[in-house]
Structures are given as C-alpha cells and as structure tokens.
Amino acid sequence: MKNKNTLRGLGSALIDDKSYIFVCSDEEMNHGEFVVRESEDGIIFKTKASNAKIVNINGPSDNFDECTSFHVSKDGKNYYLTYKLCDEEQLCIARSKNLIDWEKRSSLKLNDGNAKIVSDYLYAGRNIMYSGGDALRLYVSEDFETWKRTKKDLITTAGDDSELLVMEAQVVQDGVFVMYAEVYKDQENISQYKLYGALFDYGDPTKLLWKSKEPIYKTNNTKNNTATLFGVAIFDEYFVSYWIDKNDEMFLVRHFYKHDSDIKEVEKTPDIIDEQLNETPFELKRSELNPILKPRKKHGHTWESQATYNPTAIESDGVIHIIYRADGDDMMSVWGYASTVDGVTIKDRLTNCIYQRKTPSIKMPFSPPTLYTSGNNSGGGCEDPRAVLIDGIIYVTFTAFDGWGSVRVGLTSINFEDFKNKRWKWKKTVLISPPGEINKNWVLFPEKIGGKFAIMHSFTPSILIDYFDSLDELDGHIFINSNNTRPIDPSRKWDSWFRGVGPAPLKTSDGWLVFYHAMDHNNPDRYRLGALLLDLEDPTQELYRSRGPILEPKEQYENEGHKWGVVYSCGAVIKDEQVFVYYGGADKFVCVATAPLQQLLNSLKQNTEFRMIIN
C-alpha cells in the first residue's frame, strides 16, 4: 500500500513539558476538525485526538483552510488557543479544558501577523501576548478576551521585505524567552527563514535583556525554497522546528544549542543559543584488508574476470554469508559467493557463480533504448542483490537488466538449508516492478511487520512500503507501483540528490537502521553513504538522519576501477555488537567498513539532523 501524507501543519505548542502539533486534512477542514498530536520529546508523536473542534456559539465555525499560526497556552486548568484568520486579518482566541473541545471566545483585529500568549504568567495582574508583523509587540489582557497593545515596539524587522512571526514565548529561569522568525518574501513567496531568540525581563516583559545578533538557524536564501515553517518547541538541550514541504508532507528538524545561565555572561557573549554542528562527523572505519574481494582472471574464472562488487550479506550462527555481483568477459552480471567468520577475512570463496539470470534472446524493436549503464555490464543479467533471511528462506531482490530496454526489480528465493549446503536451488525469478519503467534499490525488511512481508520501494519524495501476506502474491502479473522520480532537494547539502536505499534495513532497539546512497547535485559524480533510523512499528516515520556522510570515496580502490568516486553498499549485518557494511568500490571491488553499533546509534541520535515525516 502507498503512504500518502495529506495532512498540513496548523501550528505547535509546548505545554507542561509536552510538545503538541496541530494538523488538518482536507476532509477534516470540511468538518471543522483538526488532529492533536502529543510528544514527550518533540520528535515521536502519538495522536491525542483526531477530532478536535472549535465551536463558535455566535456563528459558523471558522474554515481551517484560511487559518494559520495555531498557538496554545495554559492558565491554571484552562487552555487558550490563538490562531490567525488570514483573509480577515483577525486573531481568534478559543478556550478548552482538554485540548480537544474548544469554544471560540473572542477575536481582535490584528495587522501584526500572529501572536502567542505566555502560559501561567501575569504582568501587573494581567496576561500577556507577544505578536509579530513589522515589529515584535506586546498585548495585555485581564480576561483573555479584551486585549490592549502597549505603545512600545520591542524589536523591528530588518526591512520592508520581511516580517516577524512569533514561534514560541515561555517563561524560563532568566526571564521570558521569545523565539521568533524573520520571514523574507519574494513577491508572495517566502524565500528565507531566519530564527532568532530574545530574552525579556521577568518583572517587565517589555524590557529587552538580550537578543541574538545572528540567526540561531536559517534556511537557504533561494526563490525555490518550498518548505514552510509552522511551529517550534523548545526543550532544555535542543529545540525542534516543524515544517511542511511542497508535497504537503510534514517534517521536523532538531537543533542542539547551549545555555549560559548567567545573564551577565549572556550580554558579553550574545550567541548563547547556537546550533551545534558536529565538527568531527561520524564515519565508518574501513578494513585494512580492503578490498576483501577482487576480480579473478585465472583458472577459468571468466565469469568474474572484470569486476566483483556491490555485495549483500546475511549472518547466521556466527558466519557471514556474502553474495556479490560479478561481471565477466561476456559483460554479463552474475552472483558469486564468499563467507567470513570475523567479518573481514574471507574463509570460503567458490570457483563457480551461484546464480545467473538469462536475458531474453529476442530484443523488442518497439521498446525505446534505455539510457542505463551500471558498472562494466552491458549484456544484462542480475545486478546488486539485497538478501534477507526470513523463516528459513533467503529472499533476494535485485536489479534485472536485459541489456537493451528493460531495467526492473526481480525477486528470487532459496531455502537456507540448501544455501548452506551449496545446493543452488533458486526459485524462478519474478519481476515485481512494472514493465517500461526503470526501478532499482527495492529492499525487503528482514522480518515481517504486523505479520506481513514489507517491501520498501521508494524513499523520496516520500517513503513507500507495500505489505503482503505472502510474496507469492507477486506472481509476475501483479506489480508494485512505485515513484522513482528521486527529485533534487536543494535545501540539503551533501545528500541533495537521493539515489537509493542500500542494504536491507537492520533492526535495532532504536529503530530500523537504513544506509542510503546520495550525492550533492552540484557534484554528481561522487556517491556517498548516509545512515538513518526509521520507526520500528511504522517505518514510514523517519526519526534520525546523519548530518553528513558516514562513508565517502577517498581510497584508491574507491576511485580507480570501472567508475571512480563510488562507494555502493547492498549488504550490512550486526555481529558481536559491530555493524559490518559491505560495499562496492569504484564498481570493481568488494570492501567492508565497520562501526560499533551503539556508537553509531548514539551518533545518529545525539549529533545529527533529525527529519521525520508525520503521517
């Protein structure tokens, strides 16, 4: 089944150390309802209510399609929701006791953008609310219904082409902290966001004690910037920003920062809040024995004379079984076999290939030629295997190339007992992607999810997974419809052009560990390897992503082969708390790189960028 995110972000809030986001689908808009999601850490959300609603006893309910900037505050036992009616330039205020059932209480004319009430705080016996627009301003109220603006502008914008949006306002140890965004517009489109922080005196919330001179976070200044910021949640060690992109998918980014507790030190060093970049990015450690497999030309090894690369791997009873792609004198791709106990030293390597796929002898004249090259293979065959072991059966997805105009995903399997005893009784290959399309890099999860086989067949622009009671449902006549557009994301840097998932996911206590291939679209000749974690129960939810590549082509064997600048992995295993990542170097060699599992997971969770699709 396809996972299509149809929600859009309305706003966010941090109440009693819990983060909330408010989202709405097209259908819910028509019923005047919205969804409330709750989180302990601002990252992993659970649905608190799917049918929250604002009732207006004085008239019809507001159309959420015209509402923005949802902010929730708390005063004693009551919650107060502020939101903006864009067309009418009105700020609306509603009240609730449970975050679900809301009653609209009042509205006021507000040309100043959005506004946020400060929770559980009184200034001279009155509630306060910070608003944005062409300046940051303060409103006060005695009853949450009638609001008066103070005369003083607190912070002004940088110019006529920008406005301020209040993202969060809350009481902290040193005063009242406000995080706001300066939004730049090119005609009607937002071209850049710059996030700033400001600290106001607790006894006088109009008195500015400090504000950041430089943005604590900013997006690229580009006319094609299509992500929209809709919320922020501030925690002790980090803050989380919530966004929606042009595909109506929501994602978040977690930003680490540091505090200075002494306000005097703050004034001397204005950048007390600063996004913490990982100065020494985590990298896999290459084996000193690399490459661990090389092409063999002697003793009749014509089937692997040109290249041995892009390996997959499975582990069982302490033995790591490696299936690698091999190209021979006939320019056809077949599979070879090797094994290792320590993960690095090859103990067993067969002299014959273990699997080959015959390509059709009749080329279809009506099919247009496919502009496709891969390694040193021009004759077709079976490329880039990805293997998993489930219930005593090894299943392998791979790229089936016919050498002319067909690049599809194939699926085959073999009983593990036959595999261990080198009886190569492979099940007949079925093609599981539709004809006439180029599809690659599809992976099976190594265990069933919700009792079903799960195949991940697209990662960008959204994660797509199909589930099956039995893989026999894919009989060569039923195909998985995917999306292999792989658009460029200019907001990202080293991995702006996602190329595909690498090995089958690895199950860890923190989520499904996935390695993926990507490149900088401005430097498209260098494949790099990144890592991320997906939610165990719903792997369409992305939890953590490496800020930088964990492996990139630097060594001679990764740059001198059939294609320079390539590290390409199809296999990874966890053995003795170590992760072994098997990869092809320069489309010619089999290599391995390792990392302690917990160190890799900690690096992903603590020192990285976080992005999660919120379905």
Image (cartoon, rainbow, N blue to C red):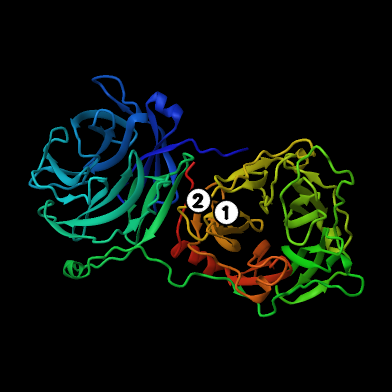
Left or right: residue 323 versus residue 151 is right
Where disc 1 sits, the SS reads: strand
- Measured Cα–Cα span from mark 1 to mark 2: 8 Å
Q: Which residue is mark 2?
A: 489
Q: Residues within 10 Å of mark 2 (few under 14, many from 20)?
A: some
Judged from this view, the residue extending furthest toward the top is 59
Query: Can you give x and y, in whole percent of width and height, for residue 410 in the image?
Result: 77, 48
Where disc 2 sits, the SS reads: loop
Left or right: residue 116 versus residue 611 is left
Would residue 337 be seen by someone viewing this image from the given angle? yes
Q: Residues within 10 Å of mark 1 (few under 14, many from 20)?
A: many
- Identify the image quadrant of residue 141: top left
Between 475 and 561, the residue placed more toward the observer is 561
Mark 1 in CB contact with mark 2 (< 8 angstroms): yes
Counting residues from the start of the chain, the first of labels 1 and 2 encountered is 2
Which label sits on residue 498?
Answer: 1
Three-letter amino acid code at the position of disc 2:
Asp
Between 5 and 196, the residue placed more toward the observer is 196
Query: Can you give x and y, in whole percent of width and height, for residue 57 in the image?
Result: 25, 21
Three-letter amino acid code at the position of disc 1:
Phe
Name which residue lies at 24% across and 68% down: 260
Judged from this view, the residue extending furthest toward the bottom is 288
Q: In which quadrant of the rendered image does the N terminus lie? A: top right
Query: Can you give x and y, in whole percent of width and height, for residue 594 in the image?
Result: 62, 71
Left or right: residue 279 versus residue 122 is right
Number of numbered tags placed on the structure image: 2
Query: Can you give x and y, in whole percent of width and height, for residue 38 in the image?
Result: 39, 44
Would residue 96 be seen by someone viewing this image from the given angle? no
Which label sits on residue 394?
Answer: none
